[in-house]
Amino acid sequence: MDQKTDQVHTSQQILDIAQRLVQTRGFNAFSYADIASELKVSKASLHYHFASKAELGIKLIERYEAGMERALHEIDASGGGAATKLRRYVNIYLSVLADERMCLCGMLAAEYVTLPKAMQTALDSFFALNERWLAAILEDGRTGGTLQFKGKASEAADYVIGSLEGSMMMARSHGGTERFDAASRRLLAEFGI
Amino acid sequence: MDQKTDQVHTSQQILDIAQRLVQTRGFNAFSYADIASELKVSKASLHYHFASKAELGIKLIERYEAGMERALHEIDASGGGAATKLRRYVNIYLSVLADERMCLCGMLAAEYVTLPKAMQTALDSFFALNERWLAAILEDGRTGGTLQFKGKASEAADYVIGSLEGSMMMARSHGGTERFDAASRRLLAEFGI
DNA sequence: GACAAGTTACTTATCAATAGGTAAGCACAG
DNA sequence: CTGTGCTTACCTATTGATAAGTAACTTGTC
């Protein structure tokens, strides 16, 4: 097999495994050894691709944010009103939970104070992206009369993010998505949908 | 000094320090060495009081749940309607956040899958207590006309807990309580208060 | 009330396992 | 023969945990 392809392939595989481990166990509860044994490569090989755990963590957040950005653009492009877009946003969280995972960044938010500064900065950026996008959708919906809420759209956006992340966390220990479903329906109902 | 008093004293101090560490850093991100150096005792001494980290964790949750139970009984006894009681419940979370901490159990919920079974069970019990109490208050308020919401009270209670825990988590990385204040006001508004 | 026999609350010293990380070198494609 | 993608073989620090000992106090027995 081609080496360059291999490199990309291996790097991606490392990130895939690491992401799943962070989403299920958290950043402080997995090690290079965990990835190495699963991928059947040496720990040193992991250090070749990601010099330090902090660097791996940063790449993980950046990739996750890029994926989220793509998903948000797809929602933007897919047509439908603000209410539909909000529903689709909630469904992103639902699909993560259905895979028995936490949101990568929700997990990392819990570990925030223990993370390297660069990871904290990357995390801030992820949540800022979500807040901006959500606030715009909410404001748009209120203007168009399809969404109802009071106060600043940015505050409402923070509320939505906090609610979804928290409900996800709570639902995870009970298995299944029922609790999250109920909570997200309630959240959407607040906006009149 | 009296020995028995000493034991209680030291055990409490260990729990106090461990609790703060879990609430700020998480269970997987602190060690016996952290407590030992802060309390200026040997690690072995910690193992004398709490044979294993898992045992320490269980005691931590049990004590926290007992404290919560006391706080809830105080709210019950303090008079006032369901709306006032709900407000006071939210204020418990607010005071924890004002101390720059996460809810102990909210933190542990994030680490759920990495915890010893006995800790998971203790955690379940904590959240079950909160859910039961909240559901009763909510149902009471709805019956009395002081709180408005739709659907099952237990589901509404789950929603409140998830929202509060999540908003707390999100607020923590931004310092201050403003974001949590805004979110909790919005949450309470949902119930018509 | 004296004194042996515990008990309590620690200590020092040590352990195996694991953490993240590095140095040096090998195989192989271009 | 050079660079890429790895490996083997380490290293140091830290993890939770244990063994063995000690000083200080308590308890039961005579």
Image: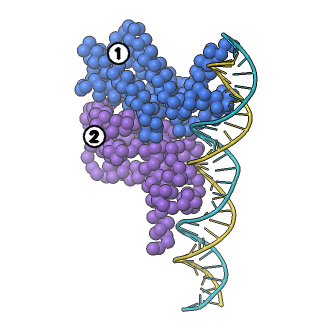
Chain colours: A blue, B purple, C cyan, D yellow
Q: Residues within 10 Å of mark 1 (few under 14, many from 20)?
A: many
| Distance from the alpha carbon under mark 2 to that under mark 1 | 30 Å
Q: Residue tagged by mark 2?
A: B83
Q: Quadrant of the C terminus of chain A?
A: top left
- Chain bearing mark 1: A
Residue type marked 2:
Ala
Q: Quick one: D28 or B134, which is closer to the camera?
A: D28
Secondary structure of the residue carrying tag 2 is helix
Q: In which quarter of the image is residue A183?
A: top left
* Residue B18 shown left or right of residue C17 in the figure: left
Question: Which mark, residue A83?
Answer: 1
- C-beta proximity under 8 Å, tags 2 and 1: no
- The image quarter in which residue C4 lies: bottom right
Residue occupying image coordinates x 43% and y 40%? A113
Q: Residue at x 56, y 30 (%)?
A: A51
Placement of A14 over or under A6, stated as above or below:
below
Q: Where is residue A75 in the image (x, y as percent from the top left)?
A: 41, 13
Which quadrant would residue A185 be assigned to in this image? top left
